[in-house]
Image (cartoon, rainbow, N blue to C red):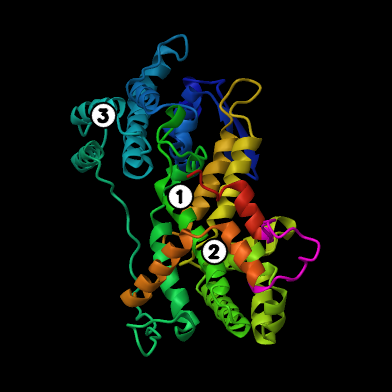
């Protein structure tokens, strides 16, 4: 009996498959069946393993997963209920060592790249269980002593709370020379080159984006204010930080325009910010593009009819392709196609990923009618998270300019303290009879913009 023939001897009726062409894809299964497939001796299904480890805490706990993996490591078929005595002996000699190697490798991957367990006594106990298990491994029952030591080091890191992350390799090419204003001590927005503003915004945002972990995208955790709410994993601090930055940038755009009492100056600021957005697009920083357009399309700015009438044709011709890129038509088809072709480094608009994750979570049941784990749902969730993760693999080759970064950070933090209704009132003071306001109440506030609507409704509004 070869490994392929003996594979399903343990859980023959607890897993089901679909086929994409000739490729076998897990559709649903019991937890035992999924763990069986996770440690399959005859075939390494890396895509399945990655999906399972990314989403496991939707359908099991860390404690249960460890128990199943250790049982799988020690499993022995009992003849004649499953196998004949001859086949069982052959399975133990030829197949069981491969299963054990798979279990050890899955534990290593989990501890190294997919650990999503909350801090607490139960997790500590689980790590000690794994530590004891690994310490008793020998080269004849698992892998090399180097693998054993690697596992023990990973467990030690998890026990001490040390996060081991893989950093992208810096580019060997020289970064573009910064475009500096004459005076770095007295910075003024209109005197800073839009390309350099875009570069410094991108460096800041890239650092924040790179910290997001796949586990932060699960369970809609970014929408929860309290940590550990309802027994679920802690909220997503890095996702929420990027959402705040996105909203600060958008508010800064609106506040900067409204700060200018002079009509001509307002049009100059709009033109400058549109050029910043265009430069961000050239850097593949689509998050900043959407954020800046959100500020330009917000109600207090959108209604400034006399200001927009003075905006130059050159600015309008620069703005139009940016608006086309972020159009909501056909579920943002132009933007999605652009992102699909983008070569990292790249910062995608996080809101659309979160919108897709919410749609998958809310639109698919956790189990099938037969009571099996609906693994198709978790494959879609993991695929979305891994797509976003793929954009984190390359870093930007740009030079930080501390003075510009400090200036922009101060401006954005000040904008965060602003109030949307105050911005509306300021807009009405600047242009009391603005575009479309003849039949509108002065105290009405309505957001505009296709991509912005998706952002607000789906995911990008925090609860604090």
SS at circle 2: helix
Give the alpha-carbon distance from disc 3 to disc 1, as whole Å: 27 Å
**Which one is closest to the eye, mark 2 or mark 3?**
2
Q: Residues within 10 Å of mark 1 (few under 14, many from 20)?
A: many
**Which one is closest to the eye, mark 3 or mark 1?**
1
Give the alpha-carbon distance from disc 2 to disc 1, as whole Å: 15 Å
- The residue wearing badge 1 is 240
Q: Is residue 303 left or right of residue 9?
A: right
Question: To which quarter of the image does residue 201 belong?
Answer: bottom left
- The residue wearing badge 3 is 124
Which is nearer the eye, 390 or 144?
390
Q: Is residue 303 above or below residue 80?
A: below
Q: Residue at x 43, y 75 (%)?
A: 199
Q: Position of residue 283 (x, y in %)?
A: 50, 73
The reply to whether residue 420 is visible in this rendering is yes
Q: Is residue 88 left or right of residue 370?
A: left
Give, as a single range, the part of the protein colored magenta: 430-450
**Which one is closest to the eye, mark 2 or mark 1?**
2
Question: Going by the picture, which residue comes out furthest to the top?
Answer: 80
- The residue wearing badge 2 is 250
Q: Is residue 42 left or right of residue 458?
A: left
Q: Residue at x 51, y 47 (%)?
A: 462
- Nearer the N terminus, badge 2 or badge 1? 1
Q: Position of residue 453 (x, y in %)?
A: 66, 55
SS at circle 3: helix
Q: Position of residue 56 (x, y in %)?
A: 46, 33
Q: Position of residue 89 (x, y in %)?
A: 36, 18
Q: Is residue 321 above or below residue 139?
A: below
């Amino acid at each position: 009996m070869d490994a392929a023939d003996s594979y399903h001897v343990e859980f023959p009726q607890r897993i089901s498959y679909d086929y994409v062409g000739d490729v076998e894809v897990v559709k649903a299964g019991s937890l035992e069946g999924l763990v069986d497939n996770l440690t399959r001796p005859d075939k390494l299904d890396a895509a399945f393993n990655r999906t399972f480890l990314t989403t496991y805490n939707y359908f099991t706990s860390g404690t249960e997963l460890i128990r199943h993996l250790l049982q799988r490591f020690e499993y022995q078929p009992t003849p004649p209920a499953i196998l004949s005595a001859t086949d069982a002996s052959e399975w133990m000699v030829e197949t069981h060592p491969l299963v054990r190697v798979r279990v050890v490798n899955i534990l290593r991957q989990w501890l190294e790249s997919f650990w999503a367990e909350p801090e607490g006594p139960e997790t500590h106990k689980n790590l000690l269980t794994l530590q004891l298990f690994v310490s008793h491994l020998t080269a004849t029952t698992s892998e090399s002593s180097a693998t054993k030591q690697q596992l023990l080091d990973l467990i030690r890191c998890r026990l001490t709370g040390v996060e081991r992350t893989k950093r992208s390799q810096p580019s060997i090419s020289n970064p573009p020379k910064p475009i500096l204003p004459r005076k770095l001590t007295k910075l003024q927005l209109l005197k800073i080159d839009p390309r350099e503003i875009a570069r410094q915004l991108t460096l800041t945002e890239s650092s924040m984006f790179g910290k997001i972990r796949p586990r932060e995208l699960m369970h809609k955790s970014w929408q929860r204010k309290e940590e550990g709410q309802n027994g679920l994993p802690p909220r997503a601090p890095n996702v929420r930080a990027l959402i705040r930055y996105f909203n600060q940038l958008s508010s800064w755009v609106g506040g900067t325009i409204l700060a200018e009492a002079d009509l001509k100056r307002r049009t100059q600021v709009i033109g400058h910010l549109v050029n910043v957005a265009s430069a961000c697009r050239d850097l593949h920083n689509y998050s900043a593009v959407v954020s800046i357009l959100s500020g330009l399309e917000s109600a207090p700015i959108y209604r400034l009819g006399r200001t927009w009438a003075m905006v130059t044709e050159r600015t309008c011709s620069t703005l139009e392709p940016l608006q086309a890129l972020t159009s909501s038509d056909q579920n943002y088809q132009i933007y999605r196609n652009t992102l699909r072709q983008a070569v990292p480094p790249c910062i995608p608009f996080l809101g659309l990923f979160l919108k897709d994750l919410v749609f998958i979570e809310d639109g698919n049941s956790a189990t099938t009618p037969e009571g099996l784990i609906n693994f198709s749902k978790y494959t879609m969730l993991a695929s979305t998270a891994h797509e976003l993760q793929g954009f984190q693999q390359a870093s930007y080759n740009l030079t930080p300019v501390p003075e510009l970064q400090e200036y922009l950070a101060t401006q954005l933090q000040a904008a965060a303290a602003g109030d949307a209704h105050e911005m509306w009132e300021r807009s009405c003071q600047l242009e009391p009879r603005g575009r479309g306001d003849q039949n509108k109440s002065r105290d009405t506030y309505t957001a505009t913009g296709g991509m912005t609507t998706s952002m607000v409704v789906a995911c990008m509004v925090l609860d604090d």
